[in-house]
Image (cartoon, rainbow, N blue to C red):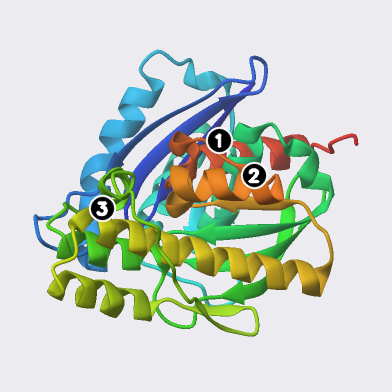
């Protein structure tokens, strides 16, 4: 048995994935949750409903040409972050589905946090699975989370310890709010980046930090002020992204001063932005995933399920 199933039902995306330990191939089927035009995200009750509607379709597509008797174990994200009390109703859809599949197939079941899945997907996609056996600094930056953690590898997985966070708005929330302000459709990240790349003006920003933690709520007000001043949309978009980029850069610098020189990894949908990626790859030689593995996905869960089941220990 060489197949490992992963399921993730976040507040933005329904996702299934399968890792083949013989071929090393990781495939996924995922779909954004539908959000009405002009709305900023979904209520949890609506997210649960849409996951319930979409998950069976994605799973059917994932396994349509698969011999399911080769599935060795099933994994699911059961909570947003690997800390006490972390909970979000939408993850119960994926976890309960995983329980049903594991019971029907009589296969092992493992649960992980959504954040662990993001980090694992980035390690797999970037070819840096050596970090599973080391300490590194990982940023998880999305619509639901803006946080840096100290990750300590244990061979088959890793544990995380909070190192820094946003004190108010998440980076993805700021991007979506500014995007809607500019008439873009939620989720706004890709279109805001396209708009920002059209800007040729030089932009200066002043990030707000308290120790290593950041404050991002100010960027929405600043962008609204720029819009009221009739600044071009591409300038407002570029200002928003530069504010977030500069904030994450300042957080990174302070964390490196505090914890020493550690490998750096950036995961989450916001970190698929090419403007931020290019800047940080040049300055920090940081690890990033491709866009398909940066946004919410079950790929990291499937890969963690494999490592946990096989008790994998990476040789340095």
Dot in front, 1 or 3: 3
Q: How far apart are marks 1 and 2 (CA)?
A: 48 Å
Look at mark 1 in the image and give the residue it sits on: 106
The answer to whether any part of residue 163 appears in the image is yes
> Quick one: quadrant of the C terminus?
top right
- Toward the front, the furthest residue is 201
Q: What element carries label 2?
A: helix
Please state the horizontal and vertical placement of residue 305, each as a whole percent of the image: 63, 40
Q: Which residue is drawn at 33% across and 44% down?
A: 197
46 to the left or right of 158 = left
Q: Does the rendering let one see residue 81?
A: no
Residue contact at pointers 1 and 2, CB within 8 angstroms: no
Image point (38%, 55%), residue name = 10
Q: Where is residue 184 in the image (x, y as percent from the top left)?
A: 16, 53
Q: How far apart are marks 1 and 3 (CA)?
A: 41 Å
Drawn side of residue 91 relative to residue 257, left or right: left
Q: How crowded is mark 3: few (under 14 residues within 10 Å), some or many (20 or more)?
A: many
Name the residue located 48 percent from the left edge and 44 percent from the top edge. 294
The correct choice, above or below, for 96 with respect to 40 in the image is above
* Quadrant assignment, res 315: top right
Around disc 2, counting alpha carbons within 10 Å, would you say few (fewer than 14), some (14 to 19), or many (20 or more)? Answer: few
What is the secondary structure assignment of the residue under circle 1?
Answer: loop
Residue sticking out furthest to the right: 316
- Mark 3 lies on residue: 188
- x and y, in percent, of residue 29 in the image: 37, 31
Up the image or down, 316 lies above or below 182; here it is above
Position of 269 relative to 48 (above/below): above
Q: Say which residue label 2 marks.
A: 282
Q: For the residues marked 3 and 2, what is the alpha-carbon distance in whole angstroms?
A: 26 Å
- Residue in front for this viewpoint, 39 or 23: 39
SS assignment at label 3: loop
């Amino acid at each position: 048995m060489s197949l490992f199933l992963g399921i993730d039902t976040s507040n933005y995306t329904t996702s299934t994935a399968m890792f083949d330990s013989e071929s090393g191939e990781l495939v996924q089927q995922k779909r954004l949750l539908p959000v009405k035009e002009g709305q900023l995200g979904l209520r949890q009750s609506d997210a649960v409903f849409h996951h319930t509607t979409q998950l069976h379709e994605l799973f059917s597509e994932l396994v349509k040409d698969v011999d399911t008797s080769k599935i060795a174990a099933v994994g699911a994200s059961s909570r947003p972050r690997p800390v006490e009390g972390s909970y979000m109703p939408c993850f119960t859809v994926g976890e309960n589905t995983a329980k049903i599949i594991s019971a029907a197939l009589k296969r092992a079941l493992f649960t992980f946090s959504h954040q662990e899945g993001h980090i694992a997907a980035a390690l797999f996609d970037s070819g840096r699975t050596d970090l599973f056996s080391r300490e590194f600094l990982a940023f998880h930056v999305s619509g639901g989370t803006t946080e840096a953690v100290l990750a300590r590898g244990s061979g088959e997985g890793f544990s995380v310890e909070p190192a820094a966070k946003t004190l108010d708005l998440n980076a993805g929330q700021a991007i979506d709010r500014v995007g809607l302000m500019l008439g873009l459709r939620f989720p706004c990240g890709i279109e805001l980046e396209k708009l920002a790349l059209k800007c040729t003006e030089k932009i200066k920003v002043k990030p707000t930090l308290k120790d290593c933690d950041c404050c991002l709520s100010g960027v929405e007000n600043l962008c609204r002020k720029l819009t009221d001043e009739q600044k071009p949309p591409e300038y407002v978009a570029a200002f928003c992204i530069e504010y977030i980029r500069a904030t994450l850069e300042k957080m990174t610098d302070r964390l490196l001063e505090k914890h020493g020189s550690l490998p750096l990894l950036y995961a989450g949908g916001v970190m698929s932005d090419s403007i931020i990626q290019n800047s940080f790859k040049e300055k920090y030689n940081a690890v990033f995933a491709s866009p398909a593995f940066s946004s919410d996905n079950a790929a990291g869960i499937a890969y963690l399920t494999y490592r946990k089941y096989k008790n994998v220990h990476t040789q340095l």
